[in-house]
Amino acid sequence: MTRSVSRGEGAWHRMPPVLGLLCVFALAACASDGSFERESFEAATDDDTPAERAGLGFTREGALERAGPVGDERARQAEAARVVRELWEVAGARGVPGEAWTFDYQVHDGALTLVSFRRTATGQGAGAAVEWSGFSRELTRSLSTLVGVKPRRLRFTLERGSERWRFDLETVRGPVAVHARTVPESLPGASAPLVSDALTVARQLLPASRVPWEGRVHERARLQFEGLRLKPEVELGVFEVQEGSGRRSAPGSADLRMPVVQALLPFSSAVGSRTVEVELEGRHVRGESEPRWRVVAATTLEPAAPPEEMQDIAREYRAMQEEILRHWREEVKDSARLAGVWSFEQLAYWYVGGFIAKGALGAMEAVAPTVVSVLGRGGAKAAQWFRTVLIRTPPAEREALQRIWMKVEAEGLMALKAGEQAELRHILARVEKALHEPLDRQAKKRLRQWARREYFDTVNPRLARELGPLRMEEYEIHHRIPLEYARLFPRMDINQGTNLVAVERTVHRSINRVWESVGQQAQRLDNRQVEALSQVIDQQYGSWFHRVHVPAESASALATAEQNALRAVKGLLAR
């Protein structure tokens, strides 16, 4: 289907230019629409968004196709500068001589996503204070060049000498982090809600009055990031006293949380839902009034492989997650400003992936049982089906759904207010209702566009090559189950490959006349009758399906087929 436009052997962008244009220009009516009618290209695409006109989908590797370039050298330099700041906040500002750390980052096209860090040597004593200016100057000077743009995992090693930090950079083995960004950005500073999240979590991680006087404790915990937010729930793990008797505790204060907060914030720049396991050390030093807390290790855990029903859309969904977060960070939260940014295909993969990954299907079942039953199967077929659902949804409700689900992607389901939850339920109920209603003219027009393009791109590119660009103008796409009766098959993707047939124009006109013979009874047909009529068409016209046809050579046979089909239809309707 459309997903293969940029992947398949007969992909759109690999076709001869004239052939590719004609696939769109020569729009054809379906059998259920009566006599053949031709629309001009302008009339057929006057409401297309830029993304639709460009046919944007996903690459063979699952990356998002975009209308324009993203990321540049300035963004890559900003990525490097941000990493230097993260190294400073976690290790550099508080390091003592002899201390050593490693930081692992996933690199993709200059985008740097923190995967993990760990203190590898504790150090002791005190040396000359290291100033931020010296730390950043030495590390920033050539970092963006050293990092490069190739996908790989880099390890920064920091070792604190008596007067300054020494740095090393190397490539290390490791799986490609699925939560890593792929587009370099000048990321804004931490938002106020995120800082509030981190303070809430830090309060739970620092147990009051539990660091022994002149002692040391070690703690492990797991945290959950959702988009750009840190969930307040903390899964506390091991807590052990490693030094000190525990008979007397060092007093604490709210200020102790800031080193912990600063160590957590760098993990917010990743994509999607992820779990970060952290290790903390609390230590009280003789002569000091309060203990010191530091995060001495943190690792983003690799998620389990997606369930089978998600495997073929997981990468596309992740690509859309990154794009949504990128726009959200840029404060493009008004859906009207996002008009044309994404195609229906891209949005469908995003919604289906998100509904499943975030466990939202159960809550949707009461208001949208048909939607839930199809999406519950998962996979690319569900996403392609949902694309046709989106085109049947009124524009205002599509925009509202996009706005609400962007917030869910950026901040999680719990971020929705009561009014937004009610609005989401209303939209889904309207989507469900539309599945059982006749398609309007606009939806039919768009579905014809998609059917023609996808048939010659992915269903039967060989026929497109055989016909050539000029002869293809004489061929139309016939829906075996017509668009007129899509309401009787709400769980079916009316544009799926098995429902599409290419036929020469005179053959299609003959098929139209057979469907038109149903007359006023069309509104009373049920799905079984429509399937039976479709089978009559298949039986009588099947020899012309998917084939090069010369009208003059089979005019008599075509007339006979039409008469046979008309008699069969009359007999079926008389029962």
Image: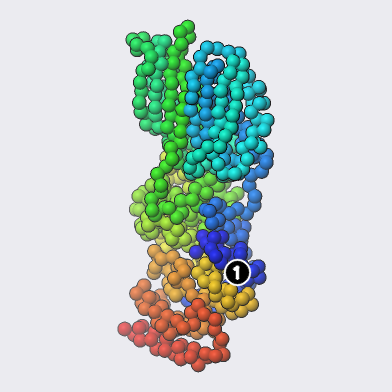
The single residue placed furthest to the bottom in the displayed view is 556
Q: Position of residue 151 (x, y in %)?
A: 56, 44
Vertical position of residue 150 compared to residue 398: above or below: above
Q: Position of residue 52 (x, y in %)?
A: 58, 60
Residue at 63% x, 40% y: name it: 148
| Closer to the camera in the image, 389 or 502 | 502
Q: Is residue 138 left or right of residue 354?
A: right
Residue at 39% x, 76% y: name it: 530
Vertical position of residue 61 compared to residue 507: above or below: above
Quadrant where the image shows the C terminus: bottom left
Judged from the image, the secondary structure of the residue bearing numbered disc 1 is helix
Can residue 393 be seen by looking at this rendering? no
Vertical position of residue 398 compared to residue 526: above or below: above
Residue at 44% x, 90% y: name it: 563
The quadrant where residue 79 appears: top right
Q: Is residue 348 left or right of residue 363?
A: right
Q: To which residue does mark 1 refer?
A: 24
Callout count: 1
Q: Is residue 242 left or right of residue 546?
A: left
Q: Position of residue 149 (x, y in %)?
A: 61, 43
Can residue 13 be seen by looking at this rendering? yes
Vertical position of residue 363 compared to residue 291: above or below: below
| Closer to the camera in the image, 502 or 8 | 8
Residue at 45% x, 8% y: name it: 286
Q: Position of residue 5 (x, y in %)?
A: 55, 62
Q: Is residue 251 left or right of residue 505?
A: left
The single residue placed furthest to the top in the displayed view is 287
| Closer to the camera in the image, 356 or 567 | 356
Label 1 is placed on what type of residue? Val
